[in-house]
Each structure stands twice: as C-alpha cells, then as structure tokens.
Image (cartoon, helix red, strand yellow):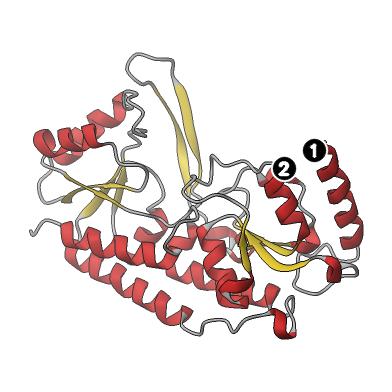
Amino acid sequence: MGTARNLLSLAAVIALGCADRSGSGNEVEGTASSRPVVAVTSGPAELLAAAAVGQARVERAAPSGVPLDRWRPDDGALDAMISARRVVVLGDEAEPWLQRAGLPPSRTVRLDAAIPEASWIEVGSFTHTHGGGESHTHGGVVAEAWTDPDLLRAMARRCEQQLGSVLEGSEAAAPPAALDARIDAYAAELRALAEALDGRALIATHHGMEYLCRWAGIGLEVTELELDGSGAPPNDAAVRDLAELAGQPGAHGGVLVWPGRLDPTFAEMAQQELGLRSVDFDLGGPLSDGDTLTRLTQSAARLRAAIAPE
C-alpha cells in the first residue's frame, strides 16, 4: 500500500510541476499546498540549504551516518521529499538512488548542475582480487566535488538562487551570513596542509580526496585497499602498491589517509610494518551531528598535525 500511495503522490506532484521543469526556484502552480520545508539527503545539501533559508526550515530525509552511495530511500523518505517545497540533492554521482527515484524536476535542486563539466575528476578503471577471490573492476567519476572550496562556493550560489524565493515571509528564517568566511577558513587550512607537506604526496586508502588535493596543489596516491572494517581481506595489488609507496622516503608525508572507514587492524599493521600513521578524514558527505564544513576543516587540521616533519 505504501508504494502505491507514493506512486499516486508522485504522479500528482509531477502534474503540478509540469509548468516548470527547469528545477529553478520559481514557484509553480500548486506548490502552496506543499510543506514549507527544504528536504535534504546529504551533509553538503544540508549545509547549503541552511545557508539559503535557515536551519529551521531544513528537514532531513535520510538517516545520519549512512554512506551516500549505500543509502536508498524507503516509502517514508520518498513521502517526505515529495511533500517538501523543495529537495536539494548532490546528483547522480554521489547519490545513485536518484536515477530511479523519479523526483519531480520542478521541486528538485541539483547541486551537480553548478559544476562545470571540465571540473569533474574521473579515475581509470582497474581490475583486481581480494585474497584469492573473484576479480572485479572499479572506476568512474569521483563524486566529492564539494571538498573543493571553489566548487563548494559555486554550489552555494546555485542553492541560494534556487531557494531564494521558495520560502516567503515568515516561512524563512534569517540565513547565516558567515558561509563565505567559513569556506575561507577551510581553504586556509588546506593551504596550511600543503605547506606542511612541502611537495610531498598524500597516500589515501580510498578515492574522495582528489578535489581538495587538486585545489591545494597536493600530490595524491590512492591505493584502493577497499577495507571497511568487515574483516574481508584487502585488495592484493593495493597492498603491494602501498608497501612500494611507503618505501620511498621523502616522497610522502608519513601518513595513511582514510577518507572511508578506518580499519584498525590494517592501520596497526601499516604503522608497525610500513611506518605510516593512519589518519581518518571526514569528507562530510553523509548527514551527521556536525555540518560538512566543520568536519572538513577539522579533518584538514588533524591531518596537517599528523604530517611527519621532513
């Protein structure tokens, strides 16, 4: 019954939104009956929506702490998004569920539309095995574009433009005016990290650091260990690559950066056998207690403090 109800609700919303399929912030006929909130499903979307309309009018449609590429909306989450005045999403690369959700375009603000095509980073495909298991292939576009301060600003401008007239009068709280200053502080922390590395590269266990490293001029080596704390063996080729990278003194900062979940067992091995200190780096994608910019800035500071002196 829940699925049937969602389909009926979705059909009604799409019919109301047919007058405007641009995804712009302009009101379309019938939106007065929607709830005066902006629904979000990610940390960056929550940050930018709150800056545009005020935190009080932002509603989470996804749970806290669930990786963006693993979450799929249930009937309740779809109901919440369909009934909201607007939904702010990152886009298909970060949120694969969007390809099948069928959200009405007139009420959906896509932050990926703010990113120039040439700014996306694509990683080449590769095939490998885990502990003698079957081989499999990875590759594609890196989703974490919001970690680049300039691209985050572009997303913020789009969000403000799209949401500026959605909540009128007393519906909208006063948005914070400090977003630009907070992005400046994050950018300054990235510059300080680059200065601490002084030309040395970072070694990361997962993709996701590419945009911030490109912005700061930091070299990056990604090993794709594919460890998630489940006890499964790591990618065999990545372990060999990591050992080779660790054996190049002066080429790296002496740390192993974990943009994904840190595996304590492997982290201890990396410290004892390879001399690499593990540091977790929160890229700020999923919803959490802290907002995305706070998590990014604190992660950059924590990483800078862990960099080994030359």
Specify the amino acid type for callout 1.
Thr
Image quadrant holding the C terminus, namely bottom left
Q: Residue at x 35, y 21 (%)?
A: 130
Of callouts 1 and 2, which one flags the residue occurring earlier in the amino acid sequence? 1
Crowdedness near tag 1: few (<14), some (14–19) or many (≥20) residues, C-alpha within 10 Å: few
Q: How many marks?
A: 2
- Image coordinates for residue 305, horizontal then vertical, percent: 17, 62
Image position of 1 (left or right of 90): right
Q: Residue at x 59, y 84 (%)?
A: 174
- Image coordinates for residue 127, horizontal then vertical, percent: 43, 26
Look at the picture and state if 259 lies above or below 111.
above
Mark identifier at residue 75? 2
* Camera-nearest residue between 46 and 92: 46
- The answer to whether the residue labelled 1 contacts the one labelled 2, judged by CB atoms less than 8 Å apart, is yes
Q: Residue at x 76, y 64 (%)?
A: 23
Mark identifier at residue 3? 1
